[in-house]
Amino acid sequence: MALSLAFPTPIQRLSQASNPQSRMKTSSVAILLFLWGAIYVSGMFTPPLLDDADSVHAEAAREMLEQHDWVTLRINHGVRYLEKAPLMYWAVATSYRLFGVKDWSSRLPLVLGILALVGTLYGFGTQAYGERGGFYSALVFATSLGPYLFTRFLIPDILVALWLSLSLLFFLRSFAENPPSRFTCWGLSTTCALNVLTKGLIGLLFPCAVILLYLLLTGNLRHLLRLRVLSSTFVFLLVAAPWHILAAVRNPAQGPVRGFLWFYFVNEHFLRYLNRRVPRDYDTVPLLVYWALVLVWLVPWSVFLPAALRGVRLRRQELASLQGRRNAPLLMAVW
């Protein structure tokens, strides 16, 4: 019996192939893969890398490979670039090693990140609303304007979205297990750590804020104790801490010259949040303009937003429910 389950007979395989749910899943995956290839793979080759973020980030990855130093980022022939987390640069440098320094090889990690994010949203939607919900979740993302624009520039935001989505998918999964498995808990902590290595402290702050607010609203803070806090914290530190420690040791402050800890934590995180970063090389936009841009990024699907908002229902009993599908809309609303 166990052998027949592990290795289906031809009749069993035929039965599975004739299953409408199986056919629907196969069709969904095929459509999503086709759209990813048509939109993102075909778009890897143009335009050429642009000034500002594109050229700086590509150069940091190129010099990482050239100088065989995967700890300290450098630009402009050896000038230390201590503000940024390394994961995107590691990915681009690996792409350069495999395929050479080209425009398309610079974008390849982001294009693969899009594919992973499409799959994550498909899984998130399927877990929350069934296969049809998963398909439409991934379809909307894959065909929206914003994700495509965010792969035109060599910035890590797509990867940040990937790790955050995976973090919350693991968190949602934890309610379906009693108790949550090591895979789920350590998956949550690992994706948070990878997000920290991608974009800094927001990789931990954002998922923790969403999770804590969600548990407060549902009156279920005790669920934190089910997430294997001690071992999950150890896994997080095991992934996130080594690069930070090495970067601090190799780039200490020397007299008036600031070191890694100041550039990375003080300048890039706190002073940037307060709009006092040194040097002042960017500007902010008003909050209303930012929200308007979100609607632009969701084109063409933003036309459905008013109807979707009219359909929102947050009932008291749904807030209290921690099982089944009904907790997913609240989690996404908090997110």
Image (cartoon, grey):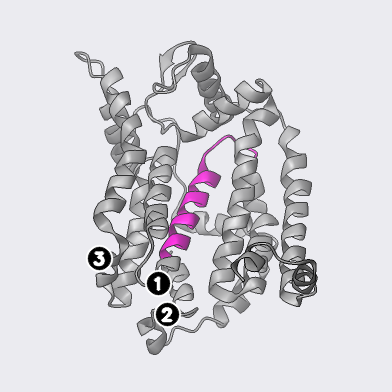
Q: CA distance from mark 2 to mark 1?
A: 7 Å
Q: Are marks 2 and 1 in contact (CB under 8 Å)?
A: yes
Label 3: few (<14), some (14–19) or many (≥20) C-alpha neighbours in 10 Å: few
Looking at this view, name the residue that lies furthest to the left: 255
Residue at the image point whose x is 19% and y is 13% from the top: 255
User: On the image, which quarter does residue 46 sit in?
Assistant: top right
Give whichever of discs 3 and 2 has the lower sequence position. 3
Q: In the rendering, which numbered label is found on residue 323?
A: 2
Q: Which residue is mark 1?
A: 175
Residue at the image point whose x is 25% and y is 65% from the top: 225
Q: Quadrant of the N terminus?
A: bottom right
| Residue 157 on the magenta segment | yes
Q: Are marks 1 and 3 in contact (CB under 8 Å)?
A: no
Closer to the camera in the image, 195 or 151 = 195
Residue at the image point whose x is 29% and y is 70% from the top: 223
Residue 136 placement, left or right of 120? right
Q: Quadrant of the C terminus?
A: bottom left
Q: Main secondary structure of the magenta part?
A: helix
Label 2: few (<14), some (14–19) or many (≥20) C-alpha neighbours in 10 Å: few
Magenta region, residue range:
151-171
SS class, disc 2: loop
At label 3, the amino acid type is Leu
Give whichever of discs 1 and 3 has the lower sequence position. 1
Q: Which residue is mark 3?
A: 225
Would residue 46 be visible to someone looking at this image?
Answer: no
Q: How many numbered marks does the figure carry?
A: 3
